[in-house]
Each structure stands twice: as structure tokens, then as C-alpha cells.
Amino acid sequence: GKVEGPLLHMLQSLVLQPAYVVGPRWDVLAWNDAAVAIFGDYGQLEGDARNILHGVFTDPHRRHLLVDWEQLARATLAAFRAESAKYTGDPDFERLIALMMRSSPEFREWWPQRDVVHRLSGLKHLRHPIAGAMTFEHMSLSIDDGSDMRLIVYTPLAEQNSVAKLKKLLDDLPS
């Protein structure tokens, strides 16, 4: 899936909301500057390293960033299971799951438990290496074009001065 036109324009216009677009396998296809400031530069990553599931379970930066890591990792896994059910047998999905089984002891332990969650939204408490504690509201929006793409948006909240911290991180991003 390629992100272009109105979706890309909308993504880029979300200046103070870290956001990215994922495809059906949860690969990050496009992202904005605010997402780079919070999550790191997806442009520096290739292949499976750009996958949300892979990042949550295998990236030490992501593990440190997510304050409630275990709870969020379990919820992420359960939501992925629910979403991927319609792709059972798809070689790309099977390959990702096999990679995750090899790469993460937690994934290996939790995948057979068959937990299913259909919605991943709500508050996200982050521990940013530069800005410190930040709180965001997290939403996942389906793109209604048959592509199975979703726009993931994080809105910074006033608590923990998250908006001001994000502005400072954006000011300090290399252009």
C-alpha cells in the first residue's frame, strides 16, 4: 500500500499529533515529523523493523518508551490477532509471526494464549529519553478505501506538560 493524496496531506498536517499509517500487517507505511520526535525515524528502519508488532516486542527503545509495557504489549498482540484473523494462511503474516516467535520470548509465551482485543485506543503514558514523562490519547482510524490501511494518531494531553514537551522536541529535530 502506498500513502498518497488526501491521506498523506492529512498525515503531514497533524503537526502536534504524532501519527503514522499502517498497512494490514501493521507495517508503518508513512509517518509525520511528530512521530519521528516521539518514536524515532521510521525512515532509518527497513523491512520488518518498521512493523509495529516487531517494534513493540523487540526494540529496546520502544520497550523503555512505553510505561505500561507488558500491558500494552499484550493488548497490541491481542489486537493484532483479531485483525490478522482474516489473513490466516497469508505468507506475509505467517512469516511475521514466525519471526516474532524467534525474536521475542514474550511473544512466544503469549501468542498461544489466543487473547483477542478489537480496539487499541485510550491513554498512552510514555517515558521519552529526552522529554521525560508524556501522556497521549491514542486513536486508530480505518481508512475507507479498501486498502486495510489505518491512521494511528497520538494527541498530547495537558498533563505532564506533554504539548510543550512535544513542541520543544519538534523544534530540536534536525531539518
Image (tube, grey):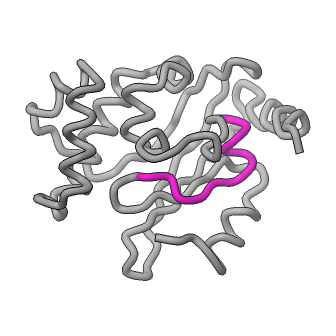
Answer with left or right where residue 174 lies relative to residue 110. Answer: right
Q: In this view of the protein, which residue sits in the foreground, 83 or 117?
A: 83
Count of marks, rendered view: 0
The image quadrant that residue 142 belongs to is bottom left
Percent x, y for residue 65?
56, 23
Residue at image point 38% right, 36% down = 54
Answer with left or right where residue 107 lies relative to residue 36. Answer: left
Residue at image point 42% right, 61% down = 23
Q: Residue furthest front?
A: 46
Q: In this picture, is 141 found above or below 112?
A: below
Q: In this view of the protein, which residue sits in the foreground, 28 or 163?
A: 28
The image quadrant that residue 156 belongs to is top right
Q: In this view of the protein, which residue sits in the foreground, 86 or 14?
A: 86
Percent x, y for residue 158?
73, 35
Residue at image point 27% right, 52% down = 118
Percent x, y for residue 79?
28, 46
Percent x, y for residue 154?
60, 46
Extent of the magenta region: 27-38
Q: Is residue 171 inside the magenta stretch?
A: no
Q: Is residue 34 inside the magenta stretch?
A: yes
